Image (cartoon, helix red, strand yellow):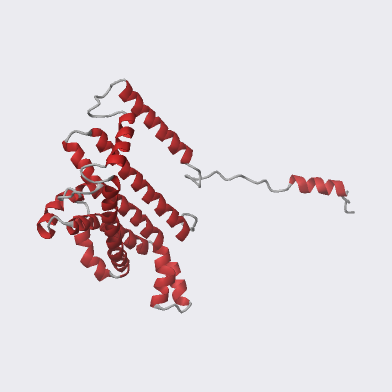
């Protein structure tokens, strides 16, 4: 005869055989916030700067105190520097950076996409880009002066060359990292060349393109001082170079701080744009 099980026993057996949930451990950052850590790091660095200057571990000529830098910043805001207001210096540098960024993006993105899609384009343009990209801008700065003179054109071209290579190579890498399964799936559904490019290739390459733009703008800001060596009378880089000639270290720190603030703002803005345009990045 078959043994009959009471309802209470069946409930107990179901409880004991229920699968146990296991919490997965995160890998890498996994969306963890790093803002508090970065803020604490900034506070520690400022405190170290204050202590080093307070106890005169470094001569003031080489490292001014934070109070001296803040005082000099207010003086530059009120009175300007080298015959120009602070806004005139900032606007001159922003114009050069924006102009170069637009040129680098409008030339580098299409060419990088073409190099990722066509072997002839890659074969023709890969060698010259790889040749000049490792060169520091100061290496071909004299050529810019000889070829283009000392006007705004040479400065913008120098910045454009510095930004162009990261943008172009990032666009190419975005195309080459495209999974072939997506292409085959679109072709099997009857997608044409333009439709394939617009719906598959470009969205897949967009994260790399935005990363290349962010890197390119950062390189542009780091090249700004070199660009404004070319007979400039306005600009943050010019202000830094002019102050260094007179050993005005506090003004040099003011210029460095302004460049760092604008570079950080640009980078943060690009990250916000990236999170809006490619919210799927890092989630596949």
Front residue of 142/123: it is 142
Left/right of residue 168 with respect to residue 184 in the rendered view: left
Front residue of 133/67: it is 67
Name of the residue lying farthest toward the front: 79
The answer to whether one can see residue 53 in this image is yes
The answer to whether one can see residue 136 in this image is no
The residue at the point 46 percent across, 37 percent down is 37
Q: Where is residue 98? Give x, y as percent.
A: 30, 57
The residue at the point 41 percent across, 34 percent down is 41
The residue at the point 34 percent across, 56 percent down is 213
Front residue of 206/284: it is 206
Measured along the vertical axis of the image, is residue 253 above or below residue 19?
above
Name of the residue lying farthest toward the left: 146
Measured along the vertical axis of the image, is residue 22 above or below residue 116?
above
Q: Where is residue 44? Give x, y as percent.
A: 40, 30
The residue at the point 34 percent across, 47 percent down is 262
Q: How many marks?
A: 0
Q: Where is residue 88? Give x, y as percent.
A: 27, 49
* Image quarter (top left, top right, bottom left or bottom right) of the N terminus: bottom right
Q: Where is residue 84? Give x, y as percent.
A: 24, 46
Measured along the vertical axis of the image, is residue 240 above or below residue 113?
above
Left/right of residue 8 with respect to residue 68 in the rendered view: right
Left/right of residue 262 with respect to residue 232 in the rendered view: right
């Amino acid at each position: 005869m078959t043994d009959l099980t009471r309802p209470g026993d069946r409930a107990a057996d179901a409880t004991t055989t229920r699968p146990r949930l296991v919490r997965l451990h995160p890998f890498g950052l996994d969306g963890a916030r790093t803002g508090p850590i970065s803020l604490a790091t900034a506070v520690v660095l400022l405190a170290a700067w204050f202590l080093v200057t307070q106890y005169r571990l470094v001569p003031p000529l080489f490292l001014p105190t934070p109070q001296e830098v803040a005082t000099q910043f207010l003086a530059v805001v009120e009175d300007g520097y080298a015959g120009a207001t602070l806004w005139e210096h900032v606007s001159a540098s922003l114009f050069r950076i924006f102009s170069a960024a637009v040129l680098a993006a409008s030339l580098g993105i299409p060419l990088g996409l073409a190099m990722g899609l066509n072997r002839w384009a890659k074969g023709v343009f890969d060698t010259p880009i790889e040749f000049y990209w490792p060169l520091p801008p100061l290496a071909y700065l004299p050529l810019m002066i000889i070829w283009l003179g000392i006007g705004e054109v040479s400065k913008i071209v120098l910045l454009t060359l510095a930004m162009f290579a990261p943008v172009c190579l990032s666009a190419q890498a975005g195309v080459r990292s495209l999974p072939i399964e997506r292409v085959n799936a679109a072709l099997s559904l009857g997608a044409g060349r333009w439709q394939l490019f617009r719906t598959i290739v470009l969205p897949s390459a967009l994260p790399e393109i935005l990363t290349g733009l962010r890197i390119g703008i950062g390189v542009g800001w780091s090249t700004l001082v070199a660009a404004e060596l070319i007979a400039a009378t306005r600009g943050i880089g010019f202000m830094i170079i002019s102050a260094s000639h007179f050993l005005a270290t506090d003004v040099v720190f003011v210029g460095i701080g302004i460049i760092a603030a604008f570079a950080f703002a640009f980078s943060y803005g690009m990250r916000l744009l990236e999170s809006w345009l490619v919210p799927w990045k890092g989630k596949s």
